[in-house]
Image (cartoon, rainbow, N blue to C red):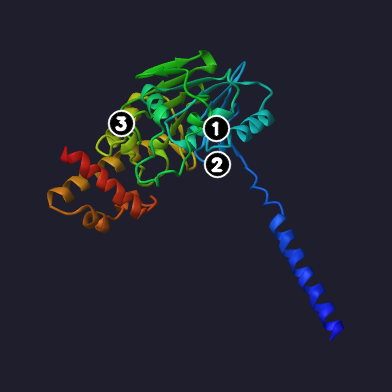
Amino acid sequence: MRRSIVLGTLMAAGALSLAVSAYQAPPSPPAPKVVEVEKIKDNLYMLKGGGGNTAVFVGTTGVVVVDTKLPGWGQPILDKVKELTPKPVTTIINTHTHGDHVSGNVEFPATVDIVTQENTKANMEKMATPTGIPAGTMPNVFQASGGKGMPKRTFKDTMTLDKGADRIDLYYFGRGHTNGDAFVVFPALRVMHAGDVFARKGPPLLDANNGGSGVAIGDTLAKAAAGIKAVDTVITGHSTPMTWADLQEYARYNQDFLEWVRAEMKAGKTVEAAAAEYKIPEKYAGYTDNPERVKLNVGVIYDELKR
């Protein structure tokens, strides 16, 4: 009897010790932030992972970074840039306001120049939750950092940075994904970063909360396709690099979607009924099917057409 009592006491003590050890064990380390590099040209790279695609343009004296990903990804971008070149980052260009494209700004040195379209700066001051995204999903890193990482310079329709082989042309053609989508062109390389106004081949996110428009996006893309010259390669917001013909096709895709929505609305269909009937036209084979995004976009366009 005495032996069993002692054994039971030892087992209980051991169990308690294991429980305490488990409770006091340090949390698992966060997953490493892996930045993948895709070389676009000899001095232009696309960094994947952690949000939207980042472009790294190595100029004569410094580096220009286009978009800086999710919170906590600014330093991994800087670390990767150091692997590519010893030159310092001098400039950030943000294509639009969303947290998966701008949040890394706060981790760059305060000396870095930050440039956006003027509407994007206004949007970044508020960091409103994008349409269709649950509230609280993305922290306002600029508010938390006391304004660090906010744009220092803006443009309305066009802006040119530097000259010669280092030249970068910025364009704004109107509302689309947001009301501040910048097209960033590297003329000497015949490459453009389009951000999320051309995120991928599929339904766009029409962020009405930040000025986006399903009525305007197709025409905005068409204006860019007609107004920007001598570009062969387009860096997309979240997909692989595309061709200029792909951009032109994507403009038509969005224009066709608008006309289809107009017809559904004219026929008296509800948003739900219209969205349930949508099928990607055969001429856009290979485009991503996203029923929830289609429903969201039908609703956004219905609201616009009712005004």
SS for callout 3: loop
Three-letter code, disc 1: Gly
Residue 120, percent across and down? 39, 27
Q: Earlier in the sequence, mark 2 or mark 1?
A: 2
Q: Which quadrant holds residue 215?
A: top left
Residue 166, percent across and down? 54, 17
**Image point 38% across, 35% down: which residue?**
128
Say whether residue 261 is left or right of residue 50. Answer: left
Distance from disc 3 to disc 1, alpha carbons, whole Å, reads: 24 Å
Labels 2 & 1 near each other (Cβ < 8 A): yes
**Image point 38% across, 21% down: which residue?**
118
236 up-or-down from 187: above or below: below
Residue 293, percent across and down? 34, 50
The C terminus lies in quadrant: top left
The N terminus lies in quadrant: bottom right
User: What residue does disc 2 label?
Assistant: 50
**Image point 60% across, 28% down: which residue?**
42
Residue 189, percent across and down? 51, 25
Say whether residue 119 is left or right of residue 164. Answer: left
Query: In front: 15, or 51?
Result: 15
Three-letter code, disc 2: Gly
SS for callout 1: helix
Q: Which quadrant holds residue 15?
A: bottom right
Distance from disc 3 to disc 2, alpha carbons, whole Å, reads: 26 Å
Q: Which mark is residue 104?
A: 1
User: What residue does disc 3 label?
Assistant: 175
